[in-house]
Amino acid sequence: MVDAMTNRRARSVFHALATALGLLLAVAAPALAQMPTFDLQGHRGARGLAPENTLAAFARALSIGVTTLETDLAITKDGVVVLAHDPWLNPDLARGPDGQWVQPDGRNRGRRIGTLTLAELKTYDIGRLNPAGPYAKQWPQQVAADGERYPTLAELVALTKSAGKPSVRFNLETKIVPDAPDLTPDPAAFARATVEAVKRADIAGRTTIQSFDWRSLVEVKKLAPELETACLTIDSGGMNTMRTDVLGASPWHAGLKLSDHGGSVPKLVKAAGCGAWSMFWRNLTPELVREAKGLGLRTLPWTVNDPAEMRRLIEMGVDGIITDYPDRLRTAMAERGLRLP
């Protein structure tokens, strides 16, 4: 009799606990589902591990597990959107149909991509770095993949589907500069080709368009207000998009003036219509992160490869990091208890 009563009480207590746990999970589940995911972006796919902006690099990033594939855009002579950091054939990357490395001009440039049709561009192999150049020494972990060709945006999207990653995001950079109009289509034409390619691939809902040259971002917003744009900035000795002319304007900022926004870069970014601010990581401070968040901007520093700096930026509260080594960033995220993609 005592045993039966004890069992009934135990069952009653267990049932009450189970009910309470179920209610707790029911309440918590939606909140957990809506928790923001830290944005792990693979720069040029995974440049530290595989040849940049190749399907091999993007496949490597997908196998590691990223939230977003970051890449650069160029436009061929016949109007096809392809993935390339430089608007010309890079002698550090490209070998011609004869197997020889592209011969550079005095500025270390080969032919402009805009002078080549897609078929002509596809004759160049970008599956390994030129061992004679200093660039190759920067990437000792990069594994060559001979036979890789300049991919199209459509081919990248197809890769994500075949890899079983149909929800991965894309961060696409319009490689255009204000002081070299002969290298690429003008901002409006570049934006139009980009938006059309994104819509044709049906990825608008998971795509961000970024650029240092905000003129192209303004044009993107005119064509597709629903697309997120990210304003890129850098203030360094080698490159400085924040330097202003005698009138107080930077040619990179689509006519906007920093002085009109209290000297605040986040406010300038907001005025440009960007939903994200992607800055050279050394330029970021905790105060700027807080200001950007107060304006509703996502903060995405680039290109961070040092695990110690990754951890520091995570603690600073950034929304994501762009890196050549997504494997290192996953480890840093795990150490900080962040959700992993």
Image (cartoon, helix red, strand yellow):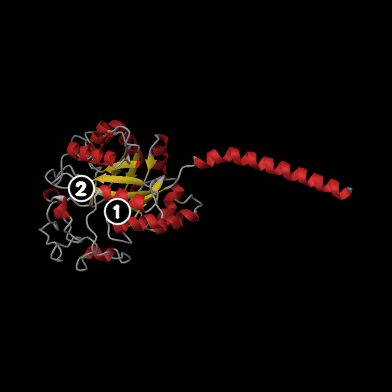
Label whose residue precedes the other's in the sequence (1 or 2): 1
Q: Percent position (x, y) of residue 256?
A: 24, 33
Residue receiving disc 1: 44
Q: For the residue marked with disc 1, what is the amino acid?
A: Arg
From this viewpoint, is residue 263 visible?
no
Q: Can you see residue 22? A: yes
- Tell me how many marks there are: 2
User: Type of residue at label 2?
Assistant: Ala
* Residue farthest to the bottom, as pictured: 132
Q: CA distance from mark 1 to mark 2?
A: 13 Å
Dot 1 surroundings within 10 Å: few (below 14), some, or many (20 or more)? many
**Numbered disc 1: secondary structure:** loop
Residue 123, above or below 297? below
- Taking depth in this image into account, of 110 and 121 the one nearest to the observer is 121
- State the image coordinates of residue 70 (x, y, percent, origin top left): 32, 49
In terms of secondary structure, where does tag 2 sit?
A: strand
The numbered mark at residue 74 is 2
Q: Residues within 10 Å of mark 2 (few under 14, many from 20)?
A: many
Q: Relative to 260, say whether 197 is above or below.
A: below
